[in-house]
Amino acid sequence: MKKVVIITGASSGIGLATANYLTSKGFKVYGISRREFFTPNFVYLKGDVTDYQNMSQIFEEIYKKEGHIDALINNAGMGISGAVEYLKADEVEKIFSVNVKSVIMLSSLILPYLRLSKGKIVNISSVASPIAIPFQSCYSATKSAIEAFSLALQNEVKSQGIKVCCVRPGDTKTNFTSSRIKTDVENDIYGKRITKSVKKMEKDEQNGKSPITVSKVIFKVLKRKNPPLLVTVGFGYKFLCLLAKFLPTRLVNFIVGKLY
């Protein structure tokens, strides 16, 4: 019997690569996205992760059709770059709604189904959680929130046989870069720092790893009976996160500030 996996944000980037990869490995994949697209590889369903009634109906329909749901991959997300000073309230509300609130609510909605299958929730975090990036403060904050939520949720549901894992990609080459909302206003206070920081970030992303490297890590997580709570993708990023954990916080923050 094929394992049934639901992936949000499946129309591009890590979500699309993972949906295709898991399908090739024998999973029955349902990919959810606001943007309509066609694929012969997996089942596409149109849905907005911030419309919880709609998502609840989608989960119920999948369960009725398949008889079981084995995993939810909370991948949908967005980014905002620029100085905090120039952020608009609606932009902040949007990124927290998509990156944090939807993950919490969709996890809540999927739990009754995963309780039956002893399934898994995989939340996509980022190296930008342990290593907070200037001029990308909201994104770093949302990913840190996801990690804290995941750790707490694991302790809530472990007695029910449900496993929760956070996967931390580093720089990954996807269209996430071009989709990021920018508030890169320049003035005498910041000079060219915002533009230089964002350009470096974008260059690193476009020279980053293929999204399939993240897909392979997610596959391993789904195959393991007891996956780790946090998994960082790539040896180099694992090393950076280890340094960030053990070096003085002031030193780590100083180095990051120099880089960006």
Image (tube, rainbow, N blue to C red):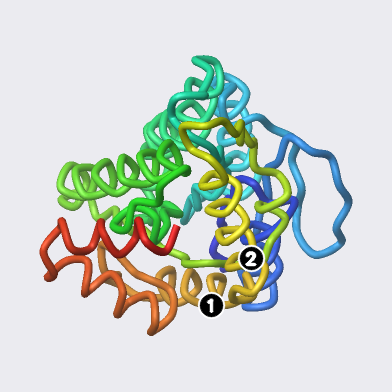
Residue at (35% x, 56% y) in the render? 257
Looking at the image, residue 170 lies above or below residue 86: below
> Where residue 232 sits in the image (x, y, percent)?
37, 70
User: How many C-alpha atoms fall within 10 Å of the one at disc 1: few (<14), some, or many (≥20)?
Assistant: some
User: How many C-alpha atoms fall within 10 Å of the one at disc 2: few (<14), some, or many (≥20)?
Assistant: some
> Where residue 141 sits in the image (x, y, percent)?
35, 40
> Which label sits on residue 203?
2
Q: Quadrant of the N terminus?
A: bottom right
Front in this rendered view, residue 98 or 19? 98
> Where residue 94 sits in the image (x, y, percent)?
54, 24
Q: Answer left or right for 133 relative to 248.
A: right
Looking at the image, residue 27 lies above or below residue 213: above
Which element is circle 1 on?
A: helix
Which element is circle 2 on?
A: helix
> Where residue 112 sits in the image (x, y, percent)?
37, 37
Residue at (13% x, 69% y) in the render? 247
User: Tag 2 or tag 1, which sits nearer the N-term?
Assistant: 2
Image marks 1 and 2: residues in contact by CB distance under 8 Å: no
Front in this rendered view, residue 92 or 183? 183
